[in-house]
Structures are given as C-alpha cells and as structure tokens.
Amino acid sequence: MRLALVRHGQTDLNLQGRLQGSSDWPLNETGLAQARQAVEEVRDTAAPWDLVVSSPRQRARRTAEIIADGLGIELGPTYELLLERDYGALEGAEEAEVERLWPGKSEPSVETLDSVVHRGLRALGELRNAWTGRRVVAVCHGTIIRYTLSEIAGRKLPQPGNATASMVEWTGGAWRVLTVGGAPV
C-alpha cells in the first residue's frame, strides 16, 4: 500500500507563527491556492490515487476536498486519529514565545510527542486495514506527519511545508518513508 500524507494548506495562524492544534481555523487565500497546487504534486507522484481522507479539522478537510475534486476521485471519511497535536493552554500562542517560556513545548497541558506518534502510527494502521490494496491520500497536519514519519525512519525528519505530500509505503510488513514534503528520504 502507498499512502500520501499531505499537510493542509496555510491558515492565518500558520502565517502568524502561532500554534494551531485543536483549534479549527479555515484555509486563507494562500492556503486555498496551495491546496490547488497540491493536486498537481500528488498527481505527479506515481500511479493514480483511489481516494482522499482527512483529519476532521476544516483546514484539512477543505484541502482534501480540493485534492479529491482536482483528481476526480472519491472523498472518503475523516479520521480523529489524524488530528494535530493538542497544544492545550498554548493554543494560539506565538511559537517563538512558547519556545522561550516552555522549551520543546513542555507546558503540562500540551499533548506529548509520544502520544502524537502513537496516534499517528495507529492512524496508519487503521488506514492500511480499511483501504487495503488502494492508494490513499490522507490530508492532516504537520506535527503528526513529521513525528510519525521520524519514528518510522528512525531519525529526525524535517517539518513538511503546507500542502506538500510525504509518501510512505507498506511493504514487507512495515512502513517505509519514501519522501517528506516531496523530498526523498
């Protein structure tokens, strides 16, 4: 199975450098344009895709709708397991200020990275079981993509840019990271 993990397009909070986890911000105009560009990035990756699923957050769902429409394929369900990291009391705060006050986003109400990775791996397993034999585009969020793929690769990988695709493949009984944000791993 091949899976494309696409980070949603830009929101105003992304633009302002603020933490955006559980809040439900829409795409801004740049984000809408990025989602339209993501159609071509995903189209150019390999054989045709079968369906698009997403996180339930509107920024991810709208990106998924644009990709599904642009590729002329099915828009599948949303998955809670694909949600972004919950930043708790830090939601909406400026990331630079958060790093100054709570290095590594260590404030106690913030979801741990271990929890994010565990959820991300469960999401990949659920998608593999639900869509065996199909090629799936899953639109979700930067932190869950980065840290889940870092766990699979066994090393720290970069944060994917907005509306970029990261490819993973299930082969030989394990996931293998092929690209992050379009760049080979």
Image: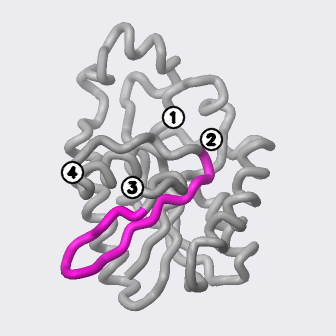
Residue to which mark 2 is pinned:
25
Left or right: 61 as drawn, with respect to 176: right
Residue to which mark 4 is pinned:
154
Marks 4/2 in contact by CB < 8 Å: the verdict is no
Q: Which residues are magenta?
A: 162-178
Q: CA distance from mark 3 to mark 4?
A: 11 Å
Q: CA distance from mark 4 to mark 2?
A: 32 Å
Circle nearer the N terminus (2, 3): 2
The relative height of residue 179 versus residue 88 in the rendered view (above or below) is below
Residue 77, percent from left and from top: 51, 74
Residue 8, percent from left and from top: 59, 51
Left or right: 14 as drawn, with respect to 106: right
Residue 69 in sight: yes
Q: How many marks?
A: 4
Give the mark toward the camera: 2 or 3. Answer: 3
- Which amino acid is tagged 3? Val
Q: In this view, which residue lies farthest toward the bottom?
A: 133
